[in-house]
Amino acid sequence: MRRTSKKFGGALRLRAAILAAFVGSASSALAEEFVIRDIRVEGVQRTETGTVFSHLPVHVGDRYDPAKGIAAVRSLYETGLFKDIRIEADGDVLVVIVEERPAIAAVELSGMKEFDKDAVKKSLKEVGLTEARVYDRSLLDRAEQELKRQYLTRGLYGVKITTTVTPVERNRVNVSIAIDEGELAKIRVIQFTGNHVFSDSTLREQMELSTPGWFTWYTNHDKYARQKLQADEETLRSYYLARGYLDFNIESTQVTISQDKKDIFITINLVEGDRYTISGVKLAGETLGLDDEFRKMIDVKPGDIYSGERMTAIAKRMTDRLSVLGYAFATANPVPEANKEKREVAFTFLIDPGRRAYVRHVNIIGNTHTRDEVIRREIRQFESSWYDADKVRLSRDRIDRLGFFEKVEVETPAVPATQDQIDVNYTVKEKPNGTIQAGAGYSSTEHLVLSGSYTQQNVFGTGHAIGIQINTSYATRTVVLSHVDPYMTEDGISRTDELYQRFSNLSRLNLATVDIGTKGFSERFGIPLTEFDTVFLGLGVEETDITLSTYSPSRYINYVNEFGTTAAGLIATAGWARDNRDNVIAPTRGNYQRAFLEVGTPYLDLQYYKATYQYQQFQPLTNRFTLAFNGQVGYGGTYNGETFPIFKNFYAGGIGSVRGYQAGTLGPRDTNGNPLGGTKEVNGSIEALAPLPGADRSLRALTFVDGGEVWGSDQSVYLSDLQFSFGVGIAWVSPIGPLKLSLAFPFHRQPGDQIQRFQFQIGTGF
C-alpha cells in the first residue's frame, strides 16, 4: 500500500506541474477585451510570419477576449516551434510576441565503433534530430535511450552516452553525442539445472552462444544477445524432441551480469520428462487417393523412439508431394495422442490439401545488370499454370547455376483477396562477373614473367562470356581468346569458340633442348537433352611446331621422325555432361558427371583418341557440413599404330589432382628425372567442407584425402601404384575468382617425388 501511495503521490505532483505550466502560459494571454484592428507578430527569425497567422484562432475584425487569447497561446505551443509566447495589445492592435526554439546547427557522434555512424545519423534524421530542424530535448532523450538499448543488445553493458547541447549564433545549437562504449561483456558461464540425460557439455555443444574460446574473437559467439539465446532455446527443444522427450520444457532462463558489467552468467532450467516410443501412425483427412504413397513415406514403426525431426520430415514429404500437384497451401499435421503411463505416443497425420493453386505472376527482383530474359529462360514454372514445387525449385537451381549471383531466393506468397492464386518471386543478388588480373614476377628459370587476363561472364547482362588470357615470360608465351553464347538458339543450344597460341622454350627451363609451338581454333556446341543432360559436339584445327637441337631428348626426336617438325590435326570432340548441382561455384548438394572424347581425325597428321570421365558428388551432412567426392579416369591411344602425341599426355599432381606433389610431376619420368606424363590416369579426392565461423558458403574450410597416378602407354595400370596425400585448406569465392589454398602431406610416396606442401589455385570450382 505504501508503494501504491507513493506512485499515486508522484502522479499528482506530475499533474500539478503540468497544470502550473499551462496556467503560466495562459497568463501570457491578454486579459482585456477589444475589437482587433490589426495583428502584429514580433520575435520571428526563421519561422514565416504566415505560419504564425495560420495557427491563430482570431483575425482582424474579431472581438478579442481572454478565452481566445488562451486558445491562441495553446495553438502556437502545439506547433513545437516556440518556447515562449506572449500576447499584448498596442491600442487596438494585437501583438503576438514569440521566442523561437533553437534550430540544430549540427549533430556530431564521437566514440562510436560498434555501429555504422552514417547509418545512425540517417536514423536520427528520420526522427527529426538533424541539421536545420527545430531542437527538441525530448527527441534527444529518446535517441539517447534507444542508442543505449541497442548497445545493450550487443552485450556492451558498460556503455556511457553523454549528450551536450551548445548554443551558437543565430539561435542555433550544436548537438554532440559522445559515446564511451566500454568493454564488451563476455559470457563466462552457461549452466543447466534439471538435466539428467544429457550433460552440460553436450547441451552447450548444441548452442550457438558459448564461453570464450579459440575462435570466439572471430565468431562473437561469446557475446550475449537475447535473440541468440532464444534461438538456442529452440535448438535445445528440438534436440530433446528428436530423441523422444516429448514433455521437454524450459521452465525459465536467468541471465545475470557482474557488478563491473564485464561478465555474463546464463542458467537454463530444464524439465526433461520421460522418453516416449511410438505406438502407431495413421492417416486422416483428404488424401486425394494417395494413401499408398503417403504410407510409404512413413519411415517409423511401432516401438521406435519418438523423434520430432522424423515426424517433421514425414510431414514435409507429404506436403511436397501435394505441392507438385498444385496444392501450394497443403498441410500434413502430425497430431499426437500421448499415453503418459505407458510412455507411448500415437500419431495421426491430418492431411489437408487445401485449394489447388495456379501461378499468377513470376517476378524477378534484384537484377540491375542481368537482363530479365537471361533469367526467365531458366525458369520452368510458367505463369497461368498450376503451381509445381519441383519446377519452382528446379528454376531456382538453374538460376543459381548461371554463376552470376551471390544469392538466389524464392518466395511463393498468396495473392491478396484470392484463394487459389500465388505469385512466384525470385530474388537475386548480383555479384561482379568481370575480372581483370595482372601480374609480374621473376624467377631464376623464367626470368621476368608478365601475365594478365580479362573475363566477363555476363557481357552487358546478356549471359554471354568472353575472355582473353595472356602470359609471357622468358620461356613460355600463351594467348587465348574465347567466347561463349549459352543460348545460340531459343532451345538452349550453346556455342563456344576458342582461338589460342602457345609457345614453350623447354631449353630455357632446363627441361629439354626443344621448342614447342601450338596454335589452333575450335568451336563446340552444347545441345540440351533434358533439364540436366547436355551433349557436346565440336571441331577444331590445331598445328604444332617442334624445333630440335643436337641435344634434344629421344622422345622428341622419335616424335619428329613420325610426324615431322610440323604436325596438323583436325580434332573432333564429343561429350556428355549431367549437372544437377545446386550451385556451380560452391555446391552443397547434387552431382556432376562428364564424359569427353577427343579424336584426331585421319584427314591430317595427328591421329589419336583421348577419353575422360569425371564424376563429382556433393552430399550435405548437416546444415553446415558438406561431403564432396571427385574422381576422374582417362585413357589415350592411337588407332593407326603410331606413337601417341606427347603433348596430349595426361599429367597428375597439384591442386585438382593430388595435392602436395608439384603439378604434373607424378608418373613416368625420363632418364633425367623429368616428368613425361602418360596415356592413362586415375585420380580422386574426398573433401569435407564447412563455412568458416561467421561466414557463408563463399568462404569454407576443408579437409581432404587425394589419390592419383598416371601410366605410360607401355605400362599396366595397378591401383597399388596410386600416390596419396591428406591435408587441410580453404575454398573462397573471391572477387577475382574461385580460390583454393591447401596444405598437404603426401604419403605412399615414390623415390624422386617432387613435394610441394603449400599450393593455391584460382579459377576452378573443385
Image (cartoon, grey):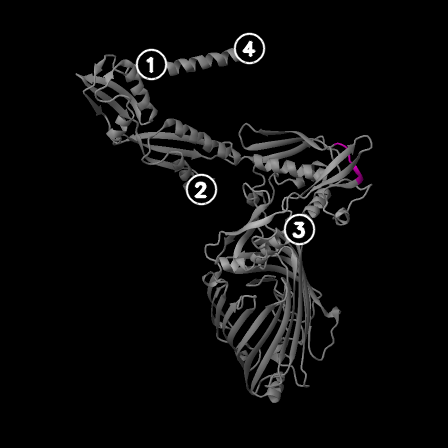
Name the amino acid, label 1: Val
Pointer 4: what residue? 1
Pointer 1: what residue? 23
Which one is in front, 132 or 310? Answer: 310
Q: Position of residue 54 (x, y in %)?
A: 28, 27
Which one is in front, 88 or 92? Answer: 92
211 relative to 404 in the view: left or right: right
Q: Which element carries disc 1, helix, strand or loop?
A: helix
Height in image: 228 above or below 165? below
Q: CA distance from mark 3 to mark 4?
A: 66 Å
Q: Residues within 10 Å of mark 1 (few under 14, many from 20)?
A: few
Q: Residues within 10 Å of mark 3 (few under 14, many from 20)?
A: some
Pointer 3: what residue? 325
Quadrant in which residue 168 is drawn: top left
Name the amino acid, label 3: Leu
Magenta stretch, residue numbers: 273-280
